[in-house]
Amino acid sequence: MTTQADIDREIQAGLDSSREHQPRLDYPAYRSSILRHPTKALQPVDPEGVELWAPCFGHSDVGEAEADLTIQHSGEPQGSRITVSGRVLDGDGRAVPHQLVEIWQANAAGRYAHLRDQHPAPLDPNFSGQGRCLTDADGWYKFTTIQPGPYPWRNHLNAWRPAHIHFSLFGTDFTQRLVTQMYFPGDPLFPLDPIFQSVTDPKAREALIATYEHDLTSPEFSLGYRWDIVLTGSHRTPLDTDEELA
Amino acid sequence: MSAAPGQTVGPFFHLGLPYEGGNDLVPPGRAGAIRLHGRVLDGDGVAVPDAMIEIWQADPDGKVCRVPGSLRRDGWTFTGFGRAATDADGHYWFSTVEPGETQPGRPPFFAVTVFARGLLDRLFTRAYLPDPDVYGADPLLGAVAPARRHTLVATRDEQGLVFDIHLQGPRETVFLSFPKHRGVWA
Ligand SMILES: [Fe+2]
């Protein structure tokens, strides 16, 4: 059985040999990736047609209440209530307005409300762990949820994921599509986690960690975390944005 | 500004991403509806039962849709976006229509993104309609080695189109990088 010490050595080898801002797809310390990563170079291509535009979502798609994961059931969920908020920006620092943000996460005990999660921690009947919202005109999103717990997984013996919230994002063109995970500051599990460490550049890894922000904390209600998300650049020039397609 | 890194969707994405009607861009069985379907396979040719496919496409006239309504479909509005998780056999399917040309002379395609447990970042590809006459004129199909070109082209079956996705191996699908990804992709 692979131990944490084995994985630590593999992680260290990755850090010693590269500094990449995006996860390495070929990253065997994450065992499930071995047969699931492409081995051939990505084919460079200029985006055209639909790729220059992103799907459009509106208030008919997403209800206001979906941004609050603590009110989906009759009772209050267990755990610490938190507010997670920030801005979605494109690679040039422009806000991504009125766009869909989706999240899913474990409950306070580190258990997902998912059949495949067999971690013997309690399910919470008052917490499903999924939410959606639209960014506002300045690219801001905001969720009210519960601090998720870290959880064990079977990558190797005694493997634990640092606490995280899964995020799914769209930009203004389809090439900016991003699915990632937000982490919490100071987690002792960071150096041990092959998913987090698959990003071998330390500055890039920091971009996945929210900051505690007292101004987002609500008195006697919830702790506040700020997490801004920068997407890759849009391939449309700003002038194109208002242009109608034929 | 440097882009946030991607991270895998993991094994529990069904909780947050697939949704009712996500794979029905048009109601199945409606006149003109086709099925676009296929399997996602790993480097051993084994089905990937925890992958998710998104498609984004023009309408049959080649128009790029800019209307909301993909998450709560009204059954009438064509939004061009769909999302489907694979089943236990690695199979995904959409009910949709064939996209038209967005630019004269360019073969139409579905833009496709692939997510999976074990895949640390999303992958982009294209599923072109079967139409061998115009391949040479297309910058992507023209640039790809002829032996791999077929991985980007759907084939026809009785209900519509088949597009398998091989994450790895001798039949590995051609995956794409766009100019603004380079540098961050290294
Ligand atoms: Fe997770």
Image (cartoon, grey):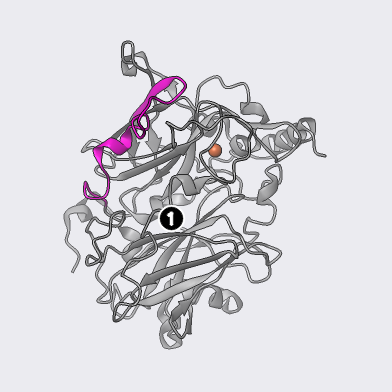
Residue at numbered disc 1:
B179
Q: Chain of mark 1?
A: B
**Residue A93 visible at all:** no
Query: Residue B158 or B106: which is nearer the viewer?
Result: B158
Magenta stretch, main secondary structure, is: loop
Q: Observer-nearest residue: A226 or B15?
A: B15
Q: Quadrant of ligand 1?
A: top right
Q: Position of residue A244 (x, y in %)?
A: 17, 61
Question: Is residue A82 located in the magenta-colored stretch of the structure?
Answer: yes
Quick one: quadrant of the N terminus of chain B? top left
Mark 1, ligand 1, within 8 Å: the answer is: no
- What residue range appears in magenta? A57-85
Q: Is residue A17 above or below residue A83?
A: below
Residue A121: x and y in percent read 60, 30
Tell me the element at label 1.
Answer: helix
Q: In the rendered view, does B58 fall on the left or right side of A157? A: left
Residue drawn at 25 percent across, 37 percent down: A64
Residue kind at label 1, given as amino acid type: Pro
User: In the drawing, does residue A35 fall left or right of residue B148?
Assistant: right
* Residue at 50% from the left image edge and 40% from the top image edge: B5
Q: Nearer the viewer, residue A72 or B156?
A: A72
Residue A180 location (% of width, % of height): 48, 41
Q: Who is closer to the viewer here, A49 or A188?
A: A188
* Image vertical order of residue B62 relative to residue A1, above or below: below
